[in-house]
Image: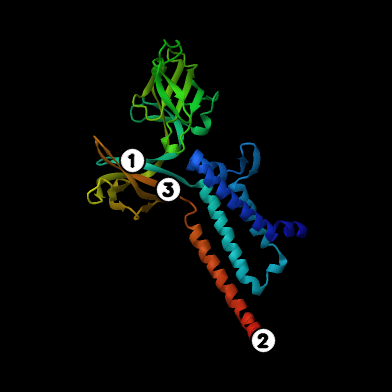
Amino acid sequence: MKQIIKTISHPKIFVYTVIWLMVLTVLGTIAQRDIGLYASQQKYFSSYITFLGDTIPAPGGRFTMIIILVNLMSMLFKHNIWKLRKAGIIIVHLGAVLLFIGSGVTAIFSSEGNMVIYEGAQSNYVDDYHKMELAVVNTSKKNLDEYTVFDQPLLKKSNKLSHENLDFVIEIIEYYNNCKVQRRTKSSDIQYKGMMKNFDLIKLKPEKESAQNRSGIIYKIENSDSNYDGIYGLILGQSVIQTATINKQNFEFLFRKKRTYLPFSIELLDFKKVLHPGTGIAKSYSSEINLIEDGLPRRVLIQMNEPLRYRGYTFFQSSFIEAPEGEATVLAAVKNYGRLFPYISSIIMAVGLLVHLVINLPRLLRKQMTGNK
């Protein structure tokens, strides 16, 4: 066991992994030019294994960070470090370990998206920036709509989706990260239903910035014992809702950004923007909102560099939309479970450095005085 700890706690491991992180940073920065920021982040930093040249496997950012964390933690199991004069080093290591744990919590559990709210309207959900979902809504209930939602990892080609709320099966025919709608020039197959009777989804090369992609899905409804068995298509932002009546129940099929519902609502009372003189460029903008929870409103002002923090969420004034139906605010919403870890770990490491200096300063001064003599 001593030999194992000695091996995995060797300082060279820390040095080599830090150098590799620097290499990943360079590779990710260069790749961003060709594949975009989000794809580069996923390939090099949010992965356990990445591929150089798409063929050579190499440690990804997460795997490298785990190696550093194990190396730092194993240092604390060395017997020769548990001495009074090394108390500062121990504290610094504890702070660094806490920092890496916090980054792991942030990477795994945190989420981010946005809220688009028009003046006079309110919203209680956040749209994810990148992930999609297929929602099947049963609108036959008198007092409520019943949602059955399938997340993006389930929307793989040939995957069959079923649920106890549904009397039919949905088979995924195709999933496109980016596509366009194109009118058919020939008569369609009898199996095509809805939009697919007159239009088709054409796969496109993904854009560098994921926000510019328009995702689409082709799916098949089967075993419904109705005339609605067939092949359907949906695309992000589709204005006409796809509906079906199966076993005397009305369903809507929605393909949209993944939604995270909040235990409160935000109502936009007034949106204001200030332009640079003589231009149409916004200098600053702010949103006066009602934060509504349990029916009780609380007025709050969100503006640039002054976000709203509530219930673990942070809402930043991100952008705005000017449309014929009115102005809308765009709030970036972030839920970061590891938000406090960097502050706490930085304080701990600062204290550790101070303790190390205080403990070792007298010895250094004595050596200095002895050398002068």
- Label 1 amino acid? Val
**Residue 28 location in percent, x, y?**
54, 45
Q: Quick check: can you spot residue 301?
A: yes
Residue 10 left/right relative to 28: right
Query: Mark 2 Cα within 10 Å, few/some/many (few <14, many 20+)?
Result: few
Residue 84 at x, y = what percent? 65, 74
Q: Which amino acid does label 3 sit on?
A: Val
Numbered badge on residue 46: none
| Quarter of the rendering containing residue 159 | top right
User: Residue drawn 53% across and 28% down?
Assistant: 156
The image shows residue 172, relative to residue 294, as above or below, that is above
Label for residue 116? 1
Query: Which label sits on residue 334?
Result: 3
Q: Which amino acid type corresponds to the residue marked 2 in the rendered image?
A: Thr
Q: Distance between the residues labelled 2 and 1?
A: 70 Å
Q: Earlier in the sequence, mark 3 or mark 2?
A: 3
Mark 2 in CB contact with mark 1 (< 8 angstroms): no
Q: Give the residue displayed 38% in from the left and 46% down from the top.
A: 332
- Label 3 and label 1: CA atoms lie apart by 14 Å
